[in-house]
Image (tube, helix red, strand yellow):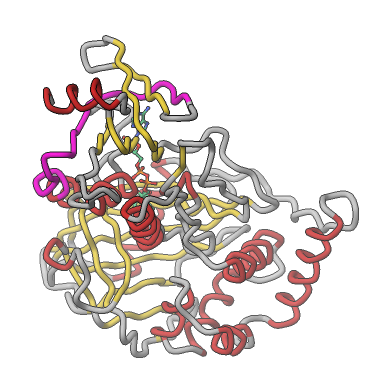
Amino acid sequence: MRARALRCMLGGMADYDVAIIGGGAAGLTLTHQLSGVNDRRGRPLRVALVEPPPGPHTPPPRTWCFWEPDGGPWDHLLAARWERLSVLGPDGTVHSSSAAPYVYKMLRSADVDAHVRATAGGDVDPLPLLVTGVRDGEGHAVVEGAEPGGGRRSLTAAWVFDSRPARPVPRGRTHLLQHFRGWFVRTSADAFDPGAALLMDLRPPQPAHGVAFGYVLPLSAREALVEYTEFGREALTTAGYERALRDYCGLLGLGEWEVTAAEQGVIPMTDARFRTRVGRRVFRVGTAGGATRPSTGYTFSGVRRQAAAVARALAEGRVPVPPVPYRRRHLAMDAVMLRALDTGRVGGAEFFAGLFGANRLGDVLAFLDGGSSLRRELAMGLSTPVAAMSLTTADQLWYSLVGGRGRGAVSPAPVPARRR
Ligand SMILES: Cc1cc2nc3c(=O)[nH]c(=O)nc-3n(C[C@H](O)[C@H](O)[C@H](O)COP(=O)(O)OP(=O)(O)OC[C@H]3O[C@@H](n4cnc5c(N)ncnc54)[C@H](O)[C@@H]3O)c2cc1C
């Protein structure tokens, strides 16, 4: 620290090359990616990882799932992996096909946190600070916040990457929520196949708006993460999720079971445009920086692509603008899907059952992570309700050309207020 202070005094430099605000998926991934990266002059980057001390601003531990071929950089930390994946239609039809080259993987956020902090080089400073403001500047930005004891502290950094939830939340034309609660359950008899994950079970009763499904990730023959998820406009109460989860465990025929832990969340599913550059020296990353895929809520892969791009730019001495990690055409397709679901032009359960029933799982997963070809995507499009999707595509095009509601754009179907 003393050498750093001296370097700052002599060079008139900022305290840090990089300040990362938030030690969640985006902050940890970026810290990990920057550890050991040198700047153009061959000096290790000085990084501050700013995370509030444990308290109301710290998200509870969670699991992060994603898919990629075997041999990924987090493989040694995985809590579980599954090669056999399936989707169950509303009538119980099993859609199961090869997911190759992908394996579905689960990480626990606490394991990632411990690993990133343990392997961070000496040039990474973890700072417990509740950030209250970021000031942009020409030569550096200033991060201000409150220390655990209540004292004020500020630091300067050449580049700031902010992963705090964006306020206000960017608004698009369509704004749905992926909201869910998951139970880690333990059964008294063998009930799960630890090699097989159920990605979408569309048998639960469907809500009046959007779609509902179960999700089962077995951790052993007697343990699994069992989730109840909806894509819709309004989150449920915890009691509502618990009722739905109890019913779902009954549907799975688990026999006797107990809940050992729970996780709950709300992930935005929106066609809003996310800006990643919000100042000369300040950027947004993670969900706040558009890393959440609108049609799925998956974020972890996007966060990794953002972090890799930032690390490359810093090593090459370029302005490290994080990319929104999805292709424009995929975002446009997602906007159509979300719109079709929100207006009720397509029934969610039938839509997803049709998609997974008519296409190889590996191809659908490639598309959902942005790695598919246009030809394959067009073929996949034919397995969705073509008339409803074409009408919605035309509606979206009209909306973007004419530029807003009230000038020909179709407004969403009214949704009855509902809380379970
Ligand atoms: C329960 C749950 C499960 C999920 N599962 C998956 C999954 O399986 N796969 C997937 O791809 N996505 C998943 N997601 C979506 C997404 O990956 C996660 O929400 C992910 O954590 C988003 O990363 P992030 O860094 O953008 O935000 P976060 O991980 O939420 O990180 C934001 C960080 O900012 C910090 N912060 C907040 N305020 C301040 C402040 N004032 N000062 C300093 N720091 C602050 C917080 O402490 C937090 O660490 C899940 C989300 C939830 C809620």
Residue range highlighted in magenta: 116-135
Q: Position of residue 376 (x, y in %)?
A: 54, 88
Query: Which image quadrant for residue 249?
Result: bottom left
Give the residue at x 19% y 76%.
Answer: 71
Query: Does residue 229 show up magenta in the picture?
Result: no
* Placement of 6 over or under 339, stated as above or below: above
Query: Does residue 134 show up magenta in the picture?
Result: yes
Q: Position of residue 264 (x, y in %)?
A: 35, 47
Q: Nearer the viewer, residue 15 or 23?
A: 15
Q: Is residue 59 left or right of residue 123?
A: right
* Placement of 132 over or under 179, stated as above or below: above
Give the residue at x 35% y 55%.
Answer: 316
* Placement of 263 over or under 216, stated as above or below: above
Query: Which image quadrant for residue 340?
Result: bottom right
Q: Is residue 263 visible?
A: yes
Q: Position of residue 363 (x, y in %)?
A: 44, 85
Q: Position of residue 11 (x, y in %)?
A: 27, 27
Give the residue at x 67% y 67%.
Answer: 336
Give the residue at x 36% y 72%.
Answer: 199
* Placement of 396 over or under 313, stated as above or below: below
Q: Nearer the viewer, residue 378 or 162?
A: 162
Query: Which image quadrant for residue 351?
Result: bottom right
Q: Is residue 246 visible?
A: no
